[in-house]
């Protein structure tokens, strides 16, 4: 479902000069897979995901997403994905119902499709108690649920989720985690960026370790445990970073 070939992004900053945010990432994410992307702040995760979502243009390389080439068919890719990031902004004067109605029309859904999909999503994310309240009045967790509802309304085959549970309470996080599990069971392809090691261990079929723009390795938790002789993902990731900074072959 997702295949990247030497995907890179380099920025230029007046003070810092050339910033190599993402360096030649080659990756394949399979249908029905929850693929975790793990790394520290400024490690390149969000830049990589924004390229896949067509928000940023790669400096070099390309990707094929749901059969469409990133450099040739960006509009088709946009229809194939649901993208949520920490910088996603919602119009505060709309209610969740009004927001989904608006985006449903953008996706050329019929009024009946919008009503049906909205109800199913409100049920799944436990949103009914606030769907007619203005978004500007909602809590952080309620706003995040509304963001997810917006990104999955058109029922895309691919979800790109950039830290969807960041800063949420345990009940809201659990709802979103269950949504992710259910989506994978429905053969959705999911890329999940997270800082929460336990979340990655619990959810992801495979995990990519990203540091300073480089993809250090990709494997399942069992594979990492066998390679590094450590049980916990935090210890495994630190082992990779320490080895890389010391110049060791990983």
Image: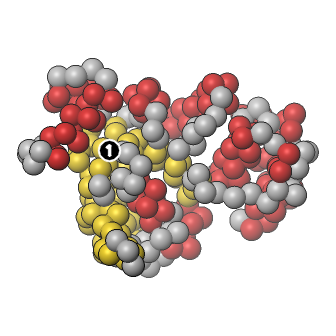
In the image, 155 versus 38, the foreground residue is 38
Q: Residues within 10 Å of mark 1 (few under 14, many from 20)?
A: some
Q: Is residue 122 visible?
A: no
Q: Position of residue 235 (x, y in %)?
A: 28, 28
Q: Position of residue 160 (x, y in %)?
A: 51, 52
Q: Which residue is mark 1?
A: 208
Q: Is residue 118 left or right of residue 17?
A: right
Kindly indicate the quadrant of the structure image that contains residue 10: bottom left
Tell me which colouring the rendered structure shows.
Answer: secondary structure
Q: Is residue 194 visible?
A: yes
Say which residue appears at 23% left-offset and 42% top-offset: 241
With respect to residue 226, does 73 lie above or below?
below
Residue lying at the far front in this picture: please name it: 15
Kindly indicate the quadrant of the structure image that contains residue 83: bottom right
Say which residue appears at 57% left-offset and 53% top-offset: 85
Q: Is residue 28 left or right of residue 96?
A: left
Q: Position of residue 167 (x, y in %)?
A: 61, 37
Q: Position of residue 112 (x, y in %)?
A: 85, 54
In the image, 7 versus 236, the foreground residue is 236
With respect to residue 155, does 225 lie above or below?
above
With respect to residue 78, does 135 lie above or below?
above
- Local SS, label 1: strand
With respect to residue 198, does 7 lie above or below?
below
């Amino acid at each position: 479902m997702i295949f990247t070939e030497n995907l890179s992004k380099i920025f230029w900053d007046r003070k810092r000069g050339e910033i190599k945010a993402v360096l030649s990432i080659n990756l394949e994410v399979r249908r029905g897979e929850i693929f975790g992307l793990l790394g520290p702040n400024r490690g390149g995760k969000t830049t990589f995901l924004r390229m896949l979502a067509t928000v940023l243009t790669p400096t070099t390389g390309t990707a094929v997403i749901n059969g469409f080439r990133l450099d040739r068919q960006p509009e088709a890719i946009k229809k194939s994905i649901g993208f949520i990031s920490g910088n996603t902004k919602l119009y505060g004067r709309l209610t969740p119902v009004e927001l989904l109605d608006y985006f449903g029309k953008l996706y050329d859904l019929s009024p009946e499709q919008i009503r049906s999909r909205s109800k199913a999503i409100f049920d799944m994310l436990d949103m009914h108690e606030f769907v007619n309240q203005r978004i500007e009045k909602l809590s952080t967790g309620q706003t995040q649920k509304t963001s997810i509802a917006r990104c999955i309304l058109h029922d895309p085959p691919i979800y790109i989720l950039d830290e969807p549970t960041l800063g949420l309470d345990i009940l809201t996080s659990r709802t979103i985690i269950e949504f992710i599990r259910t989506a994978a069971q429905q053969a959705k392809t999911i890329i999940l960026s997270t800082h929460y090691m336990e979340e990655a261990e619990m959810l992801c079929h495979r995990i990519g370790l990203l540091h300073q723009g480089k993809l250090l390795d990709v494997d399942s938790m069992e594979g990492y445990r066998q390679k590094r002789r450590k049980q916990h993902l935090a210890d495994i990731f630190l082992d990779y970073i320490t080895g890389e900074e010391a110049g060791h072959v990983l």
